[in-house]
Amino acid sequence: MDKSIDYAALGRRIRSARKAQGFSQEKLGELCGISTAHVGHIERGTRIPSADVLFRLAVELQVSMDYLFFDSSTDCNSVLKSISSRLAGRDGEKVKIFLTTVKALADKIDDL
């Protein structure tokens, strides 16, 4: 197993999570207390972020540190958190319909 960190891949995951949240580099930088340029360097893999900056990025992007380092996007908890954050503030009736649909699909998953 390679024991080095692929900072370019880490940056791509940060960029992907940032876009999924609808944040610009400027907005993410503001939320994390770093400059827009620093966000860009991290996303391109040309700067190595500190553990503190990585933690702040993960919190603001609503992803786990594990996802940032190992791309474990199939982790159920990460997926559920992502779905939950996307449903926050939405119309309650539409959320109920969505959840009913998801439950029905889950019940039939073996038939898919």
Image (cartoon, helix red, strand yellow):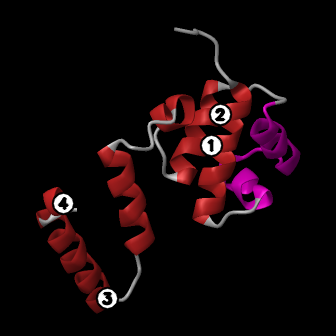
Judged by depth in the image, the label closer to the viewer, 4 or 2, is: 4
Q: Going 69% across and 49% down the picture, which residue do you hit?
A: 15
Give the spatial CA distance, label 4 vs label 1. Answer: 28 Å
x and y, in percent, of residue 44 in the image: 81, 38
Which residue is depicted at the point 75% across and 62% down? Answer: 24
Above or below for 105 versus 50: below
Q: Is residue 25 left or right of residue 51?
A: right
Q: Helix, strand, or loop for circle 4?
A: helix
Viewer-nearest of labels 3 and 4?
4
| Circle 4 residue | 109
Q: Position of residue 27 (x, y in %)?
A: 73, 61
Residue bounds of the magenta highlight: 25-45
The C terminus is located in which quarter?
bottom left
Read off the residue under disc 1.
13
Give the spatial CA distance, label 1 vs label 3.
Answer: 30 Å
What main secondary structure does the magenta stretch of the protein show?
A: helix
Query: Circle 1: is it few (<14), some (14-19), or many (20+) Cα within 10 Å?
Result: many
Label 3 amino acid? Lys
State which mark lies toward you, 4 or 1.
4
Mark 2–mark 1 distance (CA, rounded to whole Å): 5 Å
Q: Give the residue type at disc 4.
A: Ile
Inspect the magenta stretch and tell me whether residue 81 lies in it.
Answer: no
Residue pointed to by mark 2: 10
Residue denoted by label 3: 94
Q: Secondary structure at mark 1?
A: helix
Position of 91 relative to 11 (above/below): below
Asked if residue 79 lies left or right of residue 45, the reply is: left
Q: Amino acid at mark 1?
A: Arg
